[in-house]
Amino acid sequence: MPDPVTVNPMVTDAVTQSNVKVVGESPAIAISTLYQSMAHSTGILFENAVSAQQQQNILAQAAVNQGVMQIYSMDTMAGAGATEKVGQTGVSDNLTSLLTVLNAFGGGR
């Protein structure tokens, strides 16, 4: 049976210290990696929010532009005719007609 080989205590101490160093630093490295990934994700979130706001502003400007173009391209006589038609169909005429129908059925006693 061979004699057990003894290892120099300085070697075992150096290996033990390096193992303890790695085990001791791992929580700090893990948390720092987590913080870094969270900061990166938050940055991307804000970039996407700014991009969405810019796109919504462009859509709003396009809608306003289309509305102004429609207003300026409308014929003035057609606009006057439409205004007259809207003015002739007033609420008071509708209420008078409704009161006449109710009186005819005996509801206006």
Image (cartoon, rainbow, N blue to C red):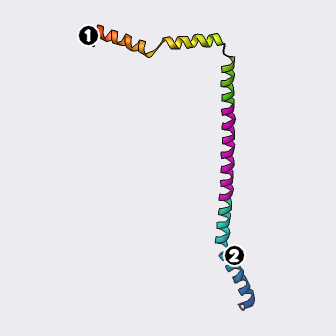
Is mark 2 in CB contact (under 8 Å) with mark 1? no
- Vertical arrangement, residue 77 with respect to residue 5, above or below: above
Does 50 appear in magenta?
yes
Residue 12 in the image, given as x and y percentages of width and height: 72, 86
Q: Is residue 5 visible?
A: no
Q: Amino acid at mark 2?
A: Val
Q: Dividing the image into 4 quarters, which one contains the N terminus?
A: bottom right
Check if residue 60 falls in the magenta segment: yes
Residue type for callout 1: Gly
Residue numbers of the magenta segment: 38-61
Badge 1 element = loop
Compared across the picture, whether 20 is left or right of 97 comes to: right
Left or right of 19, for residue 99: left
Numbered mark located on residue 28 in the image: none
- Seen in the picture, residue 76 relative to 8 is either above or below; the reply is above
Q: Nearer the viewer, mark 2 or mark 1?
A: 1
Residue at x 29% of width, y 7% of height:
104
Question: Any mark on residue 106, and which?
Answer: 1
Q: Quadrant of the C terminus?
A: top left
**Residue 85 left/right relative to 14:** left
Within 10 Å of disc 2 (Cα), the crowding (few <14, some 14-19, many 20+) is few
Q: Which one is in front, 95 or 51?
A: 95
Residue nearest the observer in this picture, 13 or 67 = 67
Residue 17: x and y, percent? 70, 83
Q: Quadrant of residue 58?
A: top right
Residue drawn at the location 65% of the way across and 50% of the way down: 45
Magenta stretch: helix, strand or loop mostly: helix
**Residue drawn 51% across the image and 13% down it:** 87
- Measure how far apart labels 2 and 1 are at the Cα level: 97 Å
* Among numbered discs 2 and 1, the one appearing first in the sequence: 2
Question: Which label belongs to residue 22?
Answer: 2
